[in-house]
Every structure is written in C-alpha cells, then in structure tokens.
Image (spheres, grey):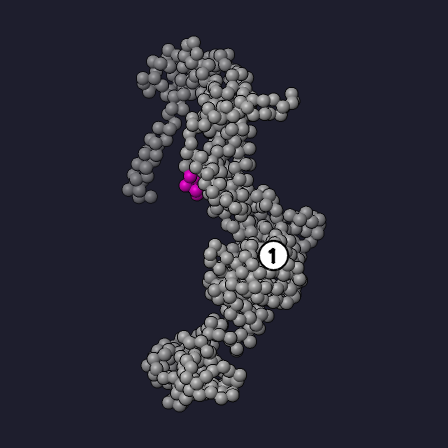
Amino acid sequence: MAGIQLSNLRKQFGTVEVIRGVDIDIRDGEFVVFVGPSGCGKSTLLRLIAGLEDITSGEIRIDGRVVNDLEPKERGIAMVFQSYAIFPHMTVRENIAFGLTIRRENRKAVEQKVAEAARMLQMENLLDRRPSQLSGGQRQRVAIGRAIVRDPSVFLFDEPLSNLDAALRMSTRQEIAALHSQLKTTMIYVTHDQVEAMTLADKIVVLRDGEVMQAGEPMHLYHQPANLFVAGFLGAPSMNFISVTVAAVDASTVRISAPAIDGFAVEKSGHGFTAGQQATLGIRPQQLRLAPKGTGPLNGRVVLTERLGSETIVDVRLNSSDIIVAALPEDTILHPGDAVSLGFDRAHAHLFEETL
Amino acid sequence: MTLERKVRLSGLYLFLGFIACIFVLPIVFMVMSSLKPDLQLLSDSSSMRAFLPVGDIGVDNYRDAFSRAPVGLFIFNSVFITATTLLLSLFLASIAAFSFVFIEWRGKAVVLAIIIATYILPFETVAVPLLLLVNNLPWLSTEGVTWGWLNSYQVQIVPWIIRALEIFLFVQYFRDLPRDLVESARVEGASWFQIYRRVVMPLSGPVIATVAILKFLEMYNNQFIWPIMVVQEEGLRPIMVGLLYFFQLNTAWGEIMAYLTIITVPVLAFYLMLQRAFIASIASTGVKG
C-alpha cells in the first residue's frame, strides 16, 4: 500500500498542454476518483502515474519515492483498462497469471494466487476459457483478477465500466467497492460518470482542461462546490443557475436581485461580494419545493414533466424566461402549461462570483 | 430455392469456373506436357489435346531431367536459401516494425520513411553496387576470416533478408493491434522483448503468413539474375538458374516441363500450408499478394 503525491505536474503533447500544474495528495488506502468531461486530461493523468506517458515537468511520488523516470513495472502499480486489454490468445488462467509468470514466480505460488483471485471474483469455472468466450463483464473481471494477483501497492482503473451495460455497470461498481474495502489498497479510478464518482470515492478530484477544479470528499463537493463547473458537474439533474445582481451585503447574508427573484437573501458568511456585482445563484433541483401559488420566489409555467417513479422531474419556464429543473416527489401531478410557484431553503442556495 | 435463384447461382458458378480455368490450365498444360515426348508435345499444343493425358504417356522426361541437371541439389539449395532467408526476414522485419510502432525514439518517423522509400528502387539499380559490396565483405568460417562472399550461400541469403515491404507490412499490422494490450503488458512487468514474443507475435498470425508467402515466392521463384551474378559453383545454384541447363545445346521442352513440375511442388505445398491464414490476412488488410 502506498500514498501518492503529484506536485505541479505538467504534460505537453507538442505545443498543447493537457495537464497544467496538477497538485494532488492521495493518502495510503484511499479510493480516489478523477472525474471530468471528455478531454479534461483525467486519463492522461492516470497514464502519467502509471508511467505510460512521460511527464513534462513536476514530480510524482509513490510511497514517498520519486517515480518520474521509472518504468511502469517499477512503480508497483496494476492497471485495469477501459478495453480490458486482456490477451485474446491466452486462457483466462494465463491472462491472470501473466504478470507472475513474467516475473518467473514459483509455479505453485502462481497457481495458488490465480485460484484465490478466481474465487474472489467468482470465476473459478471460467479459468480455461478464452476471452472470446466471455461476456463483457467477465472480461472485466479477468482484467481485475490480473491486477489483484500481483498484489500491487496502487490500483489504477481507467473507465473500467464504460463498456458494460447499465445493470452490469452497477453490479461491477459494487464489486469494485467491495474489493477496495477488502484489500484496502490505494485505488485511483477515472470516470466521466459522476454517479460512479459519488458512489465509489473517498475523495473526488474534479478536472477540467487539465486543471483540478476541486478535490475533496464526495458530499463536501456536492454541498459546497467551489465553482460553477463543479456545481454543475456533480448531481443529477444538474444544478440550476440563475444570473443575479448583488443588491446589498452584510456579514452573513448577501441580498440579491434578479428578474426572476427580487430581493432574495442568501446566507453566506465570509464572502467577498460587493453590492452591484454580477453573480450566479445555484439551486439543486432536489432543493426546490412546490409552494402555494404566487408565494414562492420562483414563479412560472410547467414546460415538461418526466415521471421517473422515485421522483418527478419538472422543467419550469420562469416569468423571467429562465428554465429551471425541479425534482419533486413522485406523486406530484403537473401538466405542461400549469402555473407553479417554487420555493427552496435559502440555506441550501449557492452563490457564485462567476457569471454565466 | 427458387428457379430464378438457381439460374443466377449456376451463372455465377460458370463464370467463377471460367476464371479458375484461366489460372489452372497453364498448370495442367505443364503437367500433361511433362508426360509427353517433345514431338507429340509440340503437335498437341495447337489443340485441346495439350490439356489431356493422351497419346504416348510416360515419365521419361522426369528421368532425363534428373540426369541432365542435379535437380535434387538445386531444390535443396533453393529450399535452404529460401527457408533461412524467410526465418531471418520474419524475425528481423517484425522486430524492426515492433520498434517503429511501439517504442518511442527520436527520429523514427524519418527512418521509417527512408526505409519505405527504398521500396521504389528496383533491384537492377542496386545490383552492381551490391555486387561490389558483397565482394569486399568479411565472413567468419571454419577457415577463419575470409574476404568476399562470392560463391557462397550467404551471398544469396543476407542481401535478401530484409526489404522495405516486409517491414511496412508488419508496421501496418502492428498499428492496428490494440495499444492497450502492449501497455497492459508493460504495466504487468513484461520487457519489450517479452511483449514482442508473448503478446504481439502470437497475435500476428495473418501478417506472418502474408510475409512468409511473399518472401517464399520472392526467394524461391524469382532468384535468377542475382545468383547468376554471384555464384559460379554448380553446387550452390538455386532452381531457377538450373532451368538454364535445359536450354543449353538442344531445348528439350518435355524435360523443361518435367523440371518445372518438380519445382512447383514445394510452392504448392507451402501455399496450401498457409492458405487459410494468407486469405484471412488479405481479406483483413487489403494487401494484395
């Protein structure tokens, strides 16, 4: 097991800088998820840690040791690829044992480790099959098995679930979570799926354009997003944003005004807002509640309703013509064109200095 | 099956049969002619009898062919030269291509471009410089270091081991292999050579078969001018040079046909052995043999 420190890490491909000064501290045994949209550099970051790409500048430490110039095999890592990357010409057994046989480990010990991994992943009966005879989920488990047997100090997962169907994705996600609690090994997991990030991570690192937007515990990021990007990226449906003007400020509250919501105060202590400044109000769809007609700070008409069973998602066009999304209880019955008033707890409203 | 479909299929098979005939008939002609005395062979050649085992049939031409030239020795020479070149070619071309595709090193794009550019040079352009070169190269043998490679096996093997085409075919094939496989092998701790031997080559059956067949045909069928230039000793000559024996003094067509039939057998055997992989690779890469 090992902690990982990335210091001012940079990576350039030609003249394009894809990783721009990343600093991340990963504790021993932590499950860290790198999340962000396509092209944000999360996979590149993982490949830099694995040693599959050379860094341009900065420093990577694994278990206190600088590994900048070490080959992947010298870093004590195991990696699971999005495409599984299991060898099609070898049986499952040979695939799992590959890293061990390369190191010429004792045959008995290899057999024992393979059997143990197979048992842990419930694929004892698949050992003599070839990858072409396996389903996607089984192939993914072979890839995980190959990583486990080497007893690495760090596991790297590069979007391991993106080729699986929804049901399998959920069960494999749970298996990975169980694996982490069993092995207690440091794991770094790359995904663009914020649900995977929220459910698996001890710590989430949100990336955008090669920079860390925010890092921290999932619920911390969810409740206290540092910026519009993180606020919009985590949570489904996405947070609603409304352009506002700061009307007045005091020590603990910021009074805002906007065409949609006049004279509304948000509690925000230690803020740096000044009166007259443009800002953005953020409200999660789950925080919105139906209020008696005409009383809520947000008034408008229903545009679309989607009944998901556990909740009803309602798109509302405000009188200011902004559209906001509300996640309402499942028994809410509304129809397009209905006039509604929406209220929310001001303690749960977010105010960002950035403008839309 | 409807009548219309039956008719259409019959038409298709007739057409394909006709095309197949165009390729097969010369071989049938060769084999049939090898069984006939020269006079009959020449008179038959103006009619369909040329393709049929009719008239005075026998194996005299084979006996005469063996007595006119050391056929067995020529076949051995050709097979030995071809097999050695082929194995070395497969190994060196694939390992060069592996380095071009999977290993990062400065200037590899330029080097590859230069190698591929040499493909457009016809052999005739380099024949004389090559002759001068091999005439001045050292070789370590049981007699110590000797200079000049003329009259040897190595002079017929070494210059032919690698040509741009083989490297190019391997490069193209390797580029299509999933990179993740190589990277995961690296993470698992495999050295470059282990990745080459245990991951990349076992997955390269089609391209190995393609290169093997192309190389075999090049070495076995087409080695003519170069051996004449560099080998005077009869005991080292390949089959195609042996063909000249049958045009000396009086041209014996029946014996030529018998000789050609004999030397065609290894080609057919080799092709049949690799046929499946060869067709698969042509179908998948679009490379024409």
Say which residue appears at 51% left-offset and 84% top-offset.
A268
Q: Quadrant of residue A294?
A: bottom left
Tell me if residue A284 comes above or below residue B220 in the rendering: below
Residue B283 covered by magenta stretch: yes
The segment highlighted magenta reads B280-287
- Count numbered badges in the picture: 1
**Screen quadrant of the C terminus of chain B:** top left
Task: Look at the picture and state if A341 lies above or below B174.
Answer: below
Percent from the top left, x then y, of residue A88?
54, 48
> Hey, what amino acid is under mark 1?
Asn
In the rendered image, residue B159 lying in the magenta stretch gets the answer no
The answer to whether any part of residue A62 appears in the image is: yes
**What chain does badge 1 belong to?**
A
Above or below residue B287? Residue A148 is below
Identified at 57% across, 66% down, the residue is: A23
- Residue furthest left in the image: B4
Front position in the image: B212 or B1 = B212
Q: Position of residue A26 (x, y in %)?
A: 61, 66
A147 w.r.t. A347: above or below: above
Judge from the rendering whether residue B47 lies leftward or rightward of residue A105; answer left or right: left
- Is B154 displayed left or right of B228 in the figure? right
Say whether residue A290 is visible: no
Determine the image quadrant of residue B55.
Answer: top left
Q: Residue at x 52, y 85 (%)?
A: A269
Quadrant (top left/top right/bottom left/bottom right) for the N terminus of chain B: top left
Label 1 residue SS: loop
**For the stretch drawn in magenta, what is the main secondary structure?**
helix
Q: Residues within 10 Å of mark 1 (few under 14, many from 20)?
A: many
Q: Nearer the viewer, residue A162 or B270?
A: A162
Most extreme residue toward the top is: B249
x and y, in percent, of residue A291 in the image:
42, 88
The residue identified by callout 1 is A68
